[in-house]
Amino acid sequence: MADIGIDKIEAILKVYETQNITKAAEELYLSQQALSKTVKYVEGELGVSLFLRSARGVLPTSMGTRFYQAFAPILQQYRTQLKEFRSISQCRLRLGLAVAALRRIGSSVLNDFSQANPGIELDIVQQPDENNIFSVISGDCELSLCPPPTGIDDGNLEFIEVWREPIYIVTRQDHPLAGRKSVTIRDLDRHPIIRSRDGDFTFRATADIFRRRGLVPNFVYTIGEFELLRDIAVKKGYLFICPELHSRYVPQGGVLIPITDPDFIMKEGFVFRRDITLSSQAKRLIQFVQDYSPHK
């Protein structure tokens, strides 16, 4: 026996309520022929007659009444639960979040958004920069608040900037570049550069801009947090490239030099897919953060 789907159950209940195939078909946006075929199909699957046909319409049989009494509450419960789940989905926003982005934009911005929009539940997933991008690509998160998808974008990603800050190099005081007031990417060519984690925006952006300039970065692979990498750069005379957030403390014997290449800027913003229409709550969050951010 084949399954009788919810649409067929709804059709039988509508025929029972109207006791008229023509009227029931109109309310269900079906043709009379299609509805009559559905009734015959259900009766055939159940092996019972649900309605008696007459020139004045249709009358339910005892089995038709029993069917209605059994399935009408179930259909109502189905509709109620479906409406509830849709309501939950419409009011929940799954957001990928780079913690550094929150530190730059303002640690209270998401709390302030929730207070201003009590009907929207933020489902926040804190993860590294690159993971935020992939969670948007996979559809796990509708939005991610993180650096742009440099070096990852498959052509289907959109980025809305809400924050930017300069990028610096940290190195030893006796480094050949130490006397400069500023440097460009070409000035960094051939100098050993400490690379950060693969998923970190600074590493991806550095590799990308070197490639676009026709250069090959001389990366030195070192594992560690930003503070440790900064200390190693000063100790060994390497270059450590970092955004302003991580340049506020320069180790003793080190210097801090801004990179003035206009294409090499630390950015934070929202990443989302172009092929998916953003929900109203996503649009509201973007607008809230844009208005909230002190820097653009």
Image: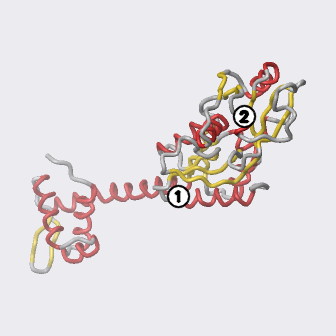
- Compare residues 18 and 175 and report the one nearer the observer: 175
- Compare residues 254 and 118 and report the one nearer the observer: 254
- Compare residues 277 and 6 and report the one nearer the observer: 277
Q: Is residue 279 above or below residue 131?
A: below
Q: In this orientation, does residue 148 appear?
A: yes
Q: Position of residue 50 (x, y in %)?
A: 15, 62
Q: Quadrant of residue 245?
A: top right
- At horizontal 19% and vertical 77% (from top left) the residue drawn is 22
- At horizontal 58% and vertical 40% (from top left) the residue drawn is 132
Q: Residue furthest top?
A: 236
The residues bearing labels 2 and 1 have C-alpha atoms spaced at a distance of: 40 Å
Q: Is residue 194 above or below residue 291?
A: above
Q: Quadrant of the C terminus?
A: bottom right
Callout 1 environment at 10 Å: few (<14), some (14 to 19), or many (20+)? Answer: some
**Is residue 81 found left or right of 119 in the rendered image?**
left
- Compare residues 6 and 117 and report the one nearer the observer: 117
**Is residue 54 found left or right of 86 in the rendered image?**
left
Q: Position of residue 259 (x, y in %)?
A: 77, 42
Q: Secondary structure at mark 2?
A: helix
N-term-proximal mark, 2 vs 1 = 2
Identify which amino acid the numbered label 1 is placed on. Leu
- Look at mark 2 in the image and give the residue it sits on: 188
- At horizontal 59% and vertical 52% (from top left) the residue drawn is 159
Identify which amino acid the numbered label 2 is placed on. Leu
Q: In the rendering, which numbered label is found on residue 119?
A: none
Q: Residue furthest bottom?
A: 56
Q: In this orientation, does residue 128 appear?
A: no
Numbered-mark total: 2
Q: Position of residue 193 (x, y in %)?
A: 70, 28
- Look at mark 1 in the image and give the residue it sits on: 278
Q: Position of residue 110 (x, y in %)?
A: 70, 49
Q: Is residue 72 above or below residue 136?
A: below
